[in-house]
Image (cartoon, coloured by chain):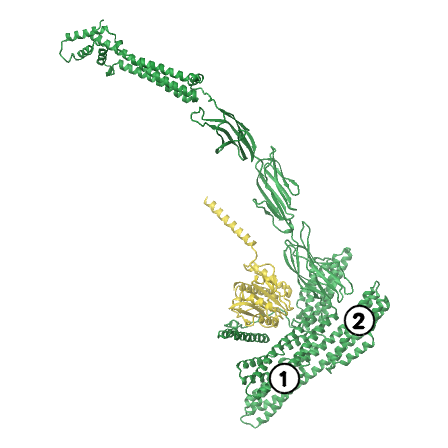
Chain colours: A yellow, B green
Amino acid sequence: MISKYFKFGIGVIFLLGMLVTVTAQDQPYDFAIARLHYDGGGDWYSDPSSLPNLINFLQENTDIKVRPEEVRLKPQDPQLFLYPYFYMTGHGNVRFSESDVQRLRRYLTTGGFLHADDNYGMDESFRREMKKVFPNKEFVELPYDHPIYHIKYDFPNGLPKIHKHDGKPPKGFGIFHDGRLIVFYTIETDLGDGWEDTDVHNDPLAKHEAALQMGTNIILYALTH
Amino acid sequence: MSKTPEQHIREVLRKFRTYLAAEHFRIGAIGALIFGLVLLGIAITAESLWYLSETSRTQLLWIIGGSVALGLFGASVWVGFLGAGGSAKYSDMSLAKRLGQKFPLLGDQIGNALSLIRESRQYHYSKDLIQANIQSVSEAIDNIDPKDAVSTDTRKFLSKALVAVAGFWIIIWLPFTGSVLDGAGRLFHPNTHYEIPQPFTFEVQPGNVQVLNADAVDISVKINGEIPDEALLTITEPNDSETIILSEDSTGQFRHTFSNIRQSFAYQVHAQSPHWWDRWDEIYSEKYRVQVLSRPQVQSLAMRLVPPRYSGLSPRNQEITSTEIVALKGTKVELRGQTNKPIKSAELAFSETGNSVQMDREETSIRAAFTIDQPDKFTIRLRDHSDITNANPAKYRITPLSDEYPRIEILQPQGDVDLGEALHIPLLLRLQDDFGFSRLTIQYQVKKPAAAEGDTTWKSTTLPLDQTDQKIVEYSHRWDLNPLNLSPRDMVRYRAALWDNDQVSGPKVSYSRIQTARFPSLSDMFTRTQQQQSGAMEDAEEIQRTIQKIKKQVDELTLEMKKKEEVNWQQQQQAENIVKSHEELKKKLEEVSKQLDQMIQEGQKHELFNEELAKKYQELQQLFKDVMTPELEEALKKLQEAMDKSDPTEVRKAMEDLQQSEQNLSENIDRAMELFKRVKIEQQMQEAVKRIKDLADRQENIANKADSSGADRNALSQEEKVAADEYDIAEKRMEDLAKSMEEFPVMPSEDMKQALSQAKMDSIASQMRQAQQSFSQGQMQQGQQQAQQSSQKLQNLSRQLQQTQQKLQQQTMNEIMKEFRAVLRNVLSMSQQQENIQQRTAPLQGKSPKMGELADEQQDLQMNLQRTVGQLVKLSQKTFGVNRNMGKALGKTASNMQNSVKNLSDRNARSASNSQSKAMAALNETAQQIMNSMNSLQSQGSSTGFENYLKQMQQMAGKQRGLNQQSMQLGQSNTPSLARQKAMQQLAQQQMGLRQSLQQMQESMKKSGGGQSMGDLRGAAQDMEKVAEDLRNNRFTRETIERQQRILSRMLDATKSLRTRDYSKKRESEVGEDLTRTGPAGLPGDYGERRNLLQEDLQRALREGYGRSYETVIREYFNELSQIQRAESSDNQ
């Protein structure tokens, strides 16, 4: 008799677990990656397979339920503040209008996070435009022991070097607000290219993997700080 | 035997007692009879009146009989008791006494005798005496009859009473003889039931009845007889009963209605007697029964909704309690139910449409299904085997939901656009629908400038659509407009059309807004470029004038300030104005930079100028940005600070520093303007070549069209007119160009004039107008010849212009290289001289007299340097090749030479030698910079540079585009399989040919050091192989189409990357090698967040407690400082 009840109890617990799991799977996503659509003529939309690959990697290797498709928004888009994390990249000119500047400033200082990745050629204009957003803040290079390099995957030497660019060491720069990292700008690395399908740039799998891991680190850091 | 006297006495006494006893018995009996008669009379009366029950009657009879019997028995017992002498009152002595009383003669003799008898033994009296007494008494009593001593009065009285009672009852009963007799009869049949005669009876309708569940029954009660005061109705259900007072209606009947009867019950009407004396307590009707027959009903119902498959929605179960069915149109509704009893038939009855659906049934199960099509209501109608139907079935309402229309929005481009040279539009569309999509097209109309109305029918091109089950998709597509065969000035109106996947009502379509894409003519584009350039040039000239003016002001003010110690208010104001002027100047410079930026973007988009020219414009743009140097900004800042402090000495010093910076400013703007002029000439030269080449091609095209059958003369005439107009503009532009070139002797202005002169002699313009006229008159052949001739003349002119262009480039390059070489020679020579001086200075010690000589030599060298600097400055106005690094190196050289002179003058050989080494190093650096610039200039001018690769890539992209189109047409055609296979093979070969060309180009670029610019093409080569394989295998799938599109996209991207200004030539997508480096030690304490010192100062100032007007001034002051600070920060980037 006792054993009958015990079995019944186990069965109930199992069914409840299934129910929770199914219900949880029916829940909407926790997080969506938003790509910043900026003006200026630069190719904000470059590396089309990068974010889908990063999203897959996040789904497979973290507990975050990520929206399968990236969201693309301009600074003026009313939904800007719904997304805690923005990614931007490009080869070319970045330009923020005055209203873009104000919105971005407000977004970043009220909890938002921007990861900008220089796809090679974006550096000058991006720094210029960010100066408009934060005239009183400087880009500071993050030391290798910063949590962003270790939060899930370890990068003891900082950013992985994915593509050659100018042959210089990769660097990660940050802008802080009240001690919180709000902008993370990566140069001489090209994480976006690293996230792309390996046959696009014929990158070795190790580079592809490293890029995805670093991308995961950045997102996890952004969501937990 | 004879009796003794004693015995005789005793016997007499015994007789007396017996008589007494008998008398008592008779009395008792009569008494009992009286009692019995009374009771009997009461009983009979009661029975007569009240119809007693059997029990009562029985009891009464028992009481009566019992009483009489008891009385008689009691009397008997008493008699016996008396007779036995049990009572002292009736003892011998007492009797003797009574006899003595009755017979006075006897007196007490008998008693005495008894005493003697009793006491003789006790007293010793004579026995004889005693005996004699006794004897005498015995003799005395012989003469009496004891019977006479018994009183009969009581008996007589009671007898009379008996008679009286009897008489009483007779008298009472006489008027009611019948009922009394009946009553007596009933009384003496106690076990027989006699119905009490009732004063009324109930006649109840309908009596026993069967009704259906929820039906009603009307009960009516007719009273036959005396109407009671009230009638009651008792309802008896299985577990309950209830009594209702019935009410009498006007007809004297009592009525009641049972409504909504759900279960069977019994009912009975009755009335209670109002008086206690009524012979009846309660009169009842018969008991009747109302039997409820159950209707058939649906006891349970399950409803399942199965949406149409295209919606992707899952089937769901409808809530049992809900009668609203809201579901997508096309949803199948499946019903399953249970009834309370077996039924004969069941159907779904739809009230709006009037349709009905028979339900499958089996015993108590019912089943049916229908599809939601329109709003409706239905009920489930049941009929059982007794033909009883269900009452008030539930009404279900069906509300079909419509599949919404899809939505489509063009996100990019926003608004109307001009088409670039590649004739494609990168579209970004947002597709939305509630359930999915089935088709996506781009619809377009082409409007020619000549046509009055243009094409009004919408043509369409279908776009591949993968994610048809998604609800919202951002779709990007590079729409290639080349198949539309557009001509310059054609306008394309286009919109996107999206169909949803509604399979029930059929796919619905929605359209985006209509946008236009214009294919600007070359002339239009050049005209616009010219306008932009002119605008920028005018503004730049204005800036130049302003700078000159400001310089003059600065010079004058500085001179004035030197004259006096004090700085008066007016001078202060002038200084303020100078600072403000610089701010305005800065804005204007930014404006010029923006104008150039716009011009460059458009120029590149429409391929109006080549890579090299684009780069020059970029550098020019940068020059304008750099006109205001950091040193100037610093000088202005110091001037402002000095004015704030109101320190005349500092103000004077700051003005002097500013004066120096103004000189640089002036030189910078002069340089920028000079270079602007040269670049403008170069642009105009390219423009002229392109215009004329374009016109030549178009003339040839016109001639070819005119030669073909079915040529439209009006269209050709119009084309010829447009071409002629454009030629006039081109000619004017060339004249302007020739004039501009005159300013620069090295430029082939004469060649330009010669080409123009030749063109005028050739009467190209008039010939084109003649051709126009010929076409309009229908003289096609003549027009064709004239167009042909114009084409040839234009070709000649084009060649001449190309030659002039080459000459311009070459001569300009030669001039620049020559001057560079001169400067280089000077620099190298100075380096040598400096080395010589240094070698002679190094060994000197103390106060050697040679130091003086060396100081003089050094000074000479310094002057030589200044001359060289002057040369370089002049050269900088001709080429961008003179860069800041050269200036810095020369500055270092000058500074070290200066130090060297000073040290030599101070007799400090060691320091002097040090400075001389540094000066030499700086000179060497300058030389290196110059050589680098020369190399760079030479490689840019090479015709084997990017230009060629760009052209090759463009050609290949064109071929790929053609290949894609042919493949698409072949894939969609119904060509017979053999012919199709053959065509596919040919296309496969072409694809492989392109792949080979691409590979060769890539290898060539790699060798020349530029292969990395097209890194993305590795994927294109692989796709080409796969496409070729598909085509060889006669396979043309969606994947093949996508690969071909991808190849073309990559080629176009590569083309863009070769020419787009925002891509650095050094762009590398080569895999990077990991580089080990020691990173920064840590984050700065302030995290890069500079305290806003200005804000803090402002707040501090405001807390000083100034009045409101002063506070306003303070705020304005700090705002301006803040703007200056921001401007400084952006410049420092």
Q: Quadrant of residue A106?
A: bottom right
Residue B866 in the image: above or below residue B173: below
Q: Is residue B1113 left or right of residue B592?
A: left
Q: Position of residue B600 (x, y in %)?
A: 68, 72
Residue type indicated by callout 2: Ala
Residue B718 in the image: above or below residue B685: above
Residue A117 seen:
no
Q: Helix or strand or loop: what does disc 2 sit on?
A: helix
Q: Nearer the viewer, residue B612 or B221?
A: B221
Residue type indicated by callout 1: Lys
Q: Position of residue B827 (x, y in %)?
A: 64, 85
Return the chain for callout 2: B
Residue that lies at the very extreme toward the bottom in this rendered image? B849
Q: Nearer the viewer, residue B674 or B884?
A: B674
Tell me the residue that label 1 is attached to: B552
Q: Position of residue B438 (x, y in %)?
A: 68, 54
Return the chain for callout 1: B
Q: Quadrant of the N terminus of chain B?
A: top left
Residue A159 in the image: above or below residue B444: below
Same chain for mark 2 and mark 1? The answer is yes
Q: Quadrant of residue B277?
A: top left
Q: Helix or strand or loop: what does disc 1 sit on?
A: helix
Q: Position of residue B990 (x, y in %)?
A: 74, 63
Tell me the residue that label 2 is attached to: B724
